[in-house]
Image: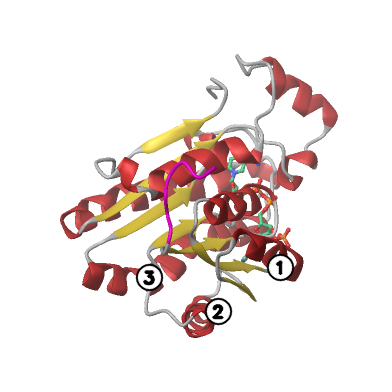
Amino acid sequence: MPRYDLTGKVALVTGAASGIGKATAIRLAKEGANLALGDLKDLSELCDSLKNYGVKVVALKLDVSDYSSCESFYKSALSELCVERVDILVNNAGINRDSLFVKMSFEQWDDVIKVDLYSMFNMTKQVVPKMLENSWGRIVNVSSISWLGNIGQANYSAAKAGVIGFTKTLARELAKHGITVNAVCPGFIDTPMTRAVPEKIREMILSRIPMKRIGNPEEVASVIAFLCSDDASYITGEVIGVTGGLVL
Ligand code: NAP
């Protein structure tokens, strides 16, 4: 049963093959949005299953760290969906390459900054001009509670803090044009990204979560769906934690 009616809207979700991006794609399809999905990984199975919700879906290879990949992805998605614009952008794709700073290689730093921060510019730059023409848009950027600083994540924390600054600035610039820009900060969510965390560290993080459980991707997707809807029409520049109470 849809809660936030997005019927007829076109939503673009990056990193849609897995975890939070996949849950978001499913949730937005349930809300009636047509979808442009991008990921490094193949999305054909997800694409077929989402068509059962009666929405149009196009799924294409995308590297969010590469401006020209974002440019051609956007053009191809519009043409395959036969639409002139994207109404909703969820900048979700992200990676982590954790290491204490003294051991962190330039490559670990560079990879994370490119995928988690450059992606914000690369993808948002595509969608904003047509949102401005239409005087309506929703942009949701996936940051992380780690933006506050977390041992072993100098690269990731820097990128995710950058996402917050980017979000708040764009929110101010675009507010008068009917475009809202918000960030969600997941805490510890059960996805392939966190399944790679060693058991000892998982236990330590779990002990610090007041709700005493790891979150699931659908719990993040529901906040994203809300922020994409008209129900969130007076919310912009906000940073919303989805953490079960976890504070770093
Ligand atoms: P995930 O399960 O690893 O999914 C991320 C998806 O993005 C993967 O399919 C990944 O493909 C794809 N991707 C990676 N690099 C890409 C690129 N350059 N271009 C396009 N797609 C790319 O991770 P997740 O946990 O759902 O994370 C989603 C977002 O939430 C990320 O921004 C992450 O930082 C954030 N987040 C997650 C948590 C958490 O606890 N899980 C907490 C805070 C924030 P590959 O697998 O091939 O790399």
Q: Which residue is mark 1?
A: 48
In the rendered image, residue 5, in percent from the top left (x then y), is placed at: 42, 50
> Does residue 71 show up magenta in the picture?
no
Relative horizontal placement of residue 81, taking residue 166 as reference (left or right): right
Pick whichever of labels 1 and 3 is earlier in the sequence.
Answer: 1
Residue at image location 48% in from the left, 56% down from the top: 90
State how far apart marks 3 and 2 are (Cα): 14 Å
Q: Secondary structure at mark 3?
A: helix
Q: Quadrant of residue 126?
A: bottom left
Residue 229 in the image: state x and y as whole percent. Answer: 37, 48
Residues 77 and 41: in front is 77
Count of residue discs = 3
Which residue lies under the disc numbered 2? 69
For the stretch drawn in magenta, the main secondary structure is loop
Magenta stretch: give its range. Answer: 1-7
- Residue 48 to residue 17: above or below: below
Q: Residues within 10 Å of mark 3 (few under 14, many from 20)?
A: many
Q: Amino acid at mark 2?
A: Ser
- Cβ–Cβ under 8 Å for marks 1 and 2: no
Label 2 environment density (alpha carbons within 10 Å; few <14, some 14–19, many ≥20)? some
Image coords of residue 160 (percent x, y): 49, 46
Label 2: element kind:
helix
Give the Cα distance between marks 1 and 3. 25 Å
Q: What residue is at 53 percent from the left and 66 percent from the top?
A: 35
SS class, disc 1: helix
Q: Looking at mark 2, is its residue's CB closer than 8 Å to ligand 1?
A: yes
- Residue ID at (52%, 78%): 77
Q: Which residue is mark 3?
A: 127
Q: The residue under label 3 is which amino acid type? A: Val
